[in-house]
Amino acid sequence: MFNKVRNALYNAVGGVEALPAVADGEDQGRMRVPKFPYARPHFLLFQQDEVQVSADHQIRPIIVPRDISKLPWSSGYAETVNAGKSTWNEDQACVQQRILVRDSEKHIQGAGMPYTYFALFDGHAGYGAAVAAANQLHNVVHKKLMDVIDHILPPLELGNNGVHLESSTPRGMSLWFPEKALPIDAFITGALELAFNEMDAQIGEDKKKYVMKGGCTCVVALFIAGKLYVANAGDSRAVRCSLGKPYPMSNDFTPSTERRRLQQLAAHKPELLSNNFTHLEYNPRPGRALIGRKILYRDVYMTGWAYKTCSPEDLRTPVVTGEGKRSRLLATIGVTRGLGDHELRSIIHNTPIKPFLSSQAEIKIYNIEAHNINESDVLVMGTDGLWDVTSNERTAEIVQHSLHNFPFGDKANAKYRFTSAAQDLVMHSRGKPEGHNWQTSGGAPGTIDDISVFVIPLAPYKSEWEAWKKLNEELHYSAKLPPSSTISSEQPATDVGLRSAVNQTTGPSDSITGPLQNGISSSTAPIEVFIPQPDDVNASELRLAEISLDAEEVTVIDPEETDVSNGESESPPASGDNADPTSPNYCER
């Protein structure tokens, strides 16, 4: 009984953890310690005393970066702590800019494909899992992308025998190839899905050795290969906003939205329920007085309702109780996807939550390269503290209004426009203190949860991507580099040495009809692949935008709108209602 009360209290207050995790004077050799210390996001550059100030539950200050150059493209970020449900802000955030490059090509100036990673983590029952994921997930994602680099980025070099050497193959030569050509989206999606799964498993192992309480939801935005990939597990959210209108890039995963999946799992594996829960759904839930009488129910294979005679087994708690934001999985937790929570059990029957709580990420794709992007198009990422109060539509309106206050013509202040938009969003959901409560400007209750928000402009990435393509093509087409072979982009990168003959030449090829696609899209234009000579490359022409956590400033190349396709352009084939790639509703799945 005591354990049930303790678990209920623990979940109600959010698993408060104090700093430091090990009290002064205790034997640290006998006590488990955190794998990562509690901190605020790295780009805030906080000292320990500032971390303490940011956790003021009475004032709930809205925190923004003091140096916006630490974020790519002057992206906006803002956060505020909860109203007292946990000691610390259990949200975490991470931003990384890295380059996918083979070890064999690191000596080549300009080799590799740059990408940018944004992530938000909403911790519950403690901050441990969120801090761990914020410190490690980007490394796992990079590892998984490197495993499929041969499908993402065509090589600059070939082996001595003309066969493509795969970075993911220990001995070099590829001994396999797919039965059919797969798009680049399949490999990046797979890398993200694997990264979420591996991160969850790593947290599970770390919990055995370190203090790492609770779990977290996770939403990731990956800008790579001219596209935006959003991976989501939980009830944090990503919404693309264009001209004051919202276009969701993720779905919320709650017991209410995933009721059918949870009921099917419970029906197929009843041993997970320990005879304490039922996979059936009732309307209304029966009590003991209804035993022997007719009640409404439905099973997992039903969309409608039917009657049955109430039995004692029907008094068991349904796997999903409640509706909407009040719905609960096994009467305990309000999310159904995320990382961590390996030790979490139901507060009423001590049944493990984890088999029902999944780390599977849903991936949505938006083709930035194929769309007309204006300077006010942004991606808003937020933890559920934002969305509990502010709808998608209201978010788009707030962002549009905020950006109008900082016109792009005002170069001195325009760089703060996305930070201001993030701050306005946090302010709208937090509201202002009214007695012991918080109220929005419209008089509605404000959220008492932690809030973290990114406002990320899309136009700078498109400019950077187009500039990188131009530089990458110059690296291939340079007259100083002798061409080595011609490969059709209709074939996957791994099929180079197995499916097509390599035609060695001594001069520029006449068969080039389009720009190098780098595996971005399926094109019938052949691709010229050269053996680069690093001594002949002009390094000043091959600079890429990079960000370093230790750097004091960020240098970004000026965007250029240059057509490098020899007068010819390619457009994706039209299909479906949203076939027009210039339409703001166009979104790849």
Image (cartoon, helix red, strand yellow):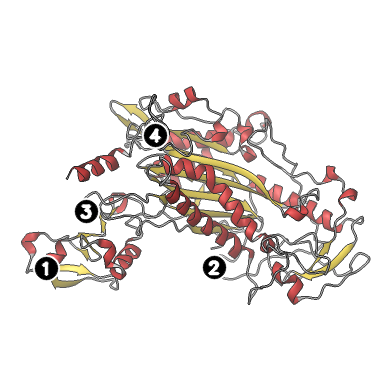
Picture quadrant of residue 264: bottom left
Residue drawn at 24 percent across, 43 percent down: 8
Q: CA distance from mark 4 to mark 2?
A: 39 Å
Kind of residue at badge 4: Arg
Side of 320 where 441 appears, left or right: right
Side of 573 where 54 appears, left or right: left
**Residue, disc 3:** 349
The residue most toward the right is: 506
Cβ atoms under marks 4 and 3 closer than 8 Å: no
Earlier-in-chain disc, 4 versus 2 = 4
Kind of residue at badge 3: His
Q: Is residue 516 above or below residue 553?
A: below
The residue most toward the top is: 49
Residue 212 visible at all: yes
Q: CA distance from mark 2 to mark 3?
A: 49 Å
Residue drawn at 53 percent across, 36 percent down: 77
* Residue 310: mark in rendering: 1
**Residue, disc 2:** 577
